[in-house]
Image (cartoon, rainbow, N blue to C red):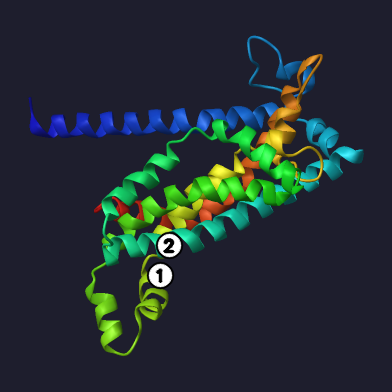
Amino acid sequence: MNPSVVRLLEKYLIGLCVIAVILFTVFPLAWIILTSVKPANIAVSYPPRFFFTPTLEHYGLLLSGSGGEVLGKAFINSILTTGISMIVTLLVACPAAYSLSRLKPAGGAAIVVFIIGVRMLPPIVLVVPLFRIFQSWGITDTQTALIIPYVGLSVPLATWMMIGFFLNLPKELEEAAMIDGCGRIKAFWHVILPLAAPGLAATSIFTGLLAWNDLVFSLPLTTVDAVTLPVIASRMRVEEGVLWGQLGAVSTIMIIPVILLTFFVQRHIVQGIASGAVKG
């Protein structure tokens, strides 16, 4: 077969594969958004209808009366618990990852294996013990009760990811900084961390999603004051069935901040994932 024809076929085949992957990824998001603007009778119609007059009635029902106050409180709780968890996780994971990648402590390999093993622990097995502990401390239905398990489960993942990013940075950078008078901590803060910004962006997104989408801890550990958006979404199932339109509206509200954040840091995410995959 003519080489030019083969290259053309390969080009079209790759293009079709890319389109298939995009459709596979985007279709669920598009379906959720469409469901949120479908009239109630069309949202549950079968076969599904793709042509209809959009409506914002489901958003209106969510935001009207006390529902709007509850949704707003849940949104703020999600933002605070996710943001604080990300910050605390990075404050703990970055020094730990730097120590394991640069200082090479005795038993470092075993420590890394232990870290990964902790992350493999199913979160559901921690719910009952944590509930009993937090109940004795009097912090159930608080943001603190969510931040503690989020940080505990995110630190192992963040540490493991950041080890790869730090290993990808040449040691000569901090050695040069220390020759110029910087201590190791100052060199880490002023030289290594700025260069590891792509890794920090990628790690923060992955760890943040664990907290943002969590229902395993937020459902049993919160009731009124500290409920998050996933808990609100779980309440869209009533005796009459699932309120698909309102569920789509809550899901869309949950998706928008993640899409915006990912859009603004996408360059760092791609660069961070690529660099972190080199060594580890």
- Where is mark 2, residue-wise? 94
Query: What x and y, as percent, mark residue 44?
Result: 71, 15
Q: Which mark is nearer the camera, 1 or 2? A: 2
Q: Are marks 1 and 2 in contact (CB under 8 Å)?
A: yes
Taking the view exactly as shown, the residue that stands out farthest to the top is 46
- Where is mark 1, residue-wise? 193
For label 1, the crowd category at 10 Å Cα-Cα, with few meaning under 14, some 14 to 19 and many 20 or more, is some
Q: Secondary structure at mark 1?
A: helix
Query: What x and y, as percent, mark residue 251?
Result: 66, 35
For label 2, the crowd category at 10 Å Cα-Cα, with few meaning under 14, some 14 to 19 and many 20 or more, is many
Please determine whether, in this image, residue 180 is positioned above or below residue 70.
below
Res. 101 image quadrant: bottom left
Taking the view exactly as shown, the residue that stands out farthest to the front is 136
Res. 86 image quadrant: bottom right
Q: Which residue is nearer to you in this view: 184 or 105? A: 105
Instruction: Look at label 2 and name its amino acid.
Output: Cys
